Amino acid sequence: MGTKIQSYRDLDIWNLGIDLVKDIYASTDKFPKHEMYGIVSQMRRSAISIPSNVAEGFKRYHNKEYRQFLYITLGSCAELETQVTIAKELKYMQADREAILLEKLDHLGRMITNLLKKL
């Protein structure tokens, strides 16, 4: 923690967000083809929104704007949590995979909330 953050790429929340995007892409790869423009697209867009909003907010000039983007990021986390659960309920995803993804989202959400408290 002694290193100064120079870029959003140095943020753990951005890196975890990128990992989550890869997890979501891998998880949705085997969903039914008829869901490509339904839940697959929605889950992928929600996941991509997480590190994207972290990056965009970091590049803003004022903490107030940065905080707003972090709140949007929390909203994307909640949206993706819901979609993961729906995917499991539709039997597109196993319960153990859902649990792993929900734990990652919970961890990421707690990290974002802690950053918001510090800003």
Image (cartoon, grey):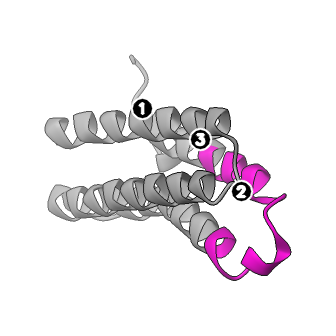
Assign a secondary structure to mark 2.
loop
- Tell me if label 3 and label 1 are in contact, CB under 8 Å: no
Give, as a single range, the part of the protein colored magenta: 20-41
Q: How far is disc 3 from disc 2 in space, using C-alphas?
A: 10 Å
Residue placed at 50% from the left, 65% from the top? 49
Mark 3 or 1, nearer chain start: 3
Q: Amino acid at mark 3?
A: Glu
Q: Which residue is mark 3?
A: 98
Place of residue 12 in the rendered image (x, y in percent of width and height, measured from the top left)? 48, 34
Place of residue 87 in the rendered image (x, y in percent of width and height, measured from the top left)? 61, 58
Q: Which residue is mark 1?
A: 107
**Compared to 1, does 77 lie above or below?**
below
Place of residue 60 in the rendered image (x, y in percent of width and height, measured from the top left)? 31, 65
Does residue 36 show up magenta in the picture?
Answer: yes
Q: Amino acid at mark 1?
A: His
Q: Is residue 90 left or right of residue 58?
A: right
Quadrant housing the N terminus: top left
Residue placed at 33% from the left, 60% from the top? 75
Given residues 93 and 55, the one toward you in this image is: 93
Q: Which residue is mark 2?
A: 92
Q: Visible in this render: residue 5? A: no
Give the farthest residue toward the top.
2
Place of residue 115 in the rendered image (x, y in percent of width and height, measured from the top left)? 26, 38
**Compared to 26, does 45 lie above or below?**
below
Assign a secondary structure to mark 1.
helix
Give the image quarter of residue 37.
Answer: bottom right
